[in-house]
Amino acid sequence: GGGGGGADESSRRLKTELLVQLDGLAKGEELVFLLAATNLPWELDPAMLRRLEKRIMVPLPNDAARLSMMLRYLRPHAAAAGVDLPAVAQRTAGYSGSDVMLLCKECAMRPLRRLMARLDQDLNPTAAMLADGEEEVSVGDITAEDVEGALGTAKPSYTEAHARRYDEWTQSFGVVV
């Protein structure tokens, strides 16, 4: 036969090998701590679930955690005085850690895009800007408008449908931290 099912066969072989390796770890003398993470626990193979003794549901980050992430991710970038990160953290309820990271990347890219647009308007921007007495070419601060624009494009990936599935899965298989 043709190539149909090749990916399924590869996936099956990979799962089988992983399960065999996990069984081998359990039979050894040394203590091994295995930490695994998934965004879709309901898609885990039942045989894998049996080998993972403790299943913990880690909830979405709260306001303080999101603020801490924003401060960390935006640390290398200057923010204008009008940027209120605690308010942004409150407005991003429902964002995952990954969503917050993407939001921060988008915030950081907006001043760079502004600079690139400005540079595209002139063939020799540095000489022209300096001749006009303007400041040197540099990426500006992240402004409140940048944050608003980023919030408009970087939406949370977590949905109410996911929330229900996570709750159902946690009630059946795990514990909440």
Image: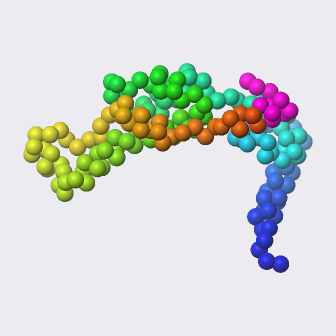
Please give left or right for residue 167 compared with residue 123 in the image. right
* Point 77% across, 74% down: residue: 3
Query: Residue 138 at x, y = what percent?
Result: 26, 41
* Point 47% across, 27% down: residue: 88
Q: Which of 90 and 15 is in front in this view?
A: 90
Query: Residue 147 at x, y = what percent?
Result: 41, 34
Examine the rendering and report whether any part of residue 122 can be seen: yes
* Dominant secondary-structure state across the stretch colored magenta: helix
Q: Which of 117 and 160 is in front in this view?
A: 160
Residue situated furthest bottom in the rendering: 1
Query: Residue 78 at x, y = what percent?
Result: 35, 31
Is 173 magenta? The answer is: yes
Q: Give the range drawn in magenta.
A: 166-177
Colour scheme: rainbow
In this rendering, the answer to whether 12 lies above or below 152 is below
* Point 15% across, 45% down: residue: 129
In this rendering, the answer to whether 125 lies above or below 49 is below
Please give left or right for residue 25 compared with residue 62 in the image. right
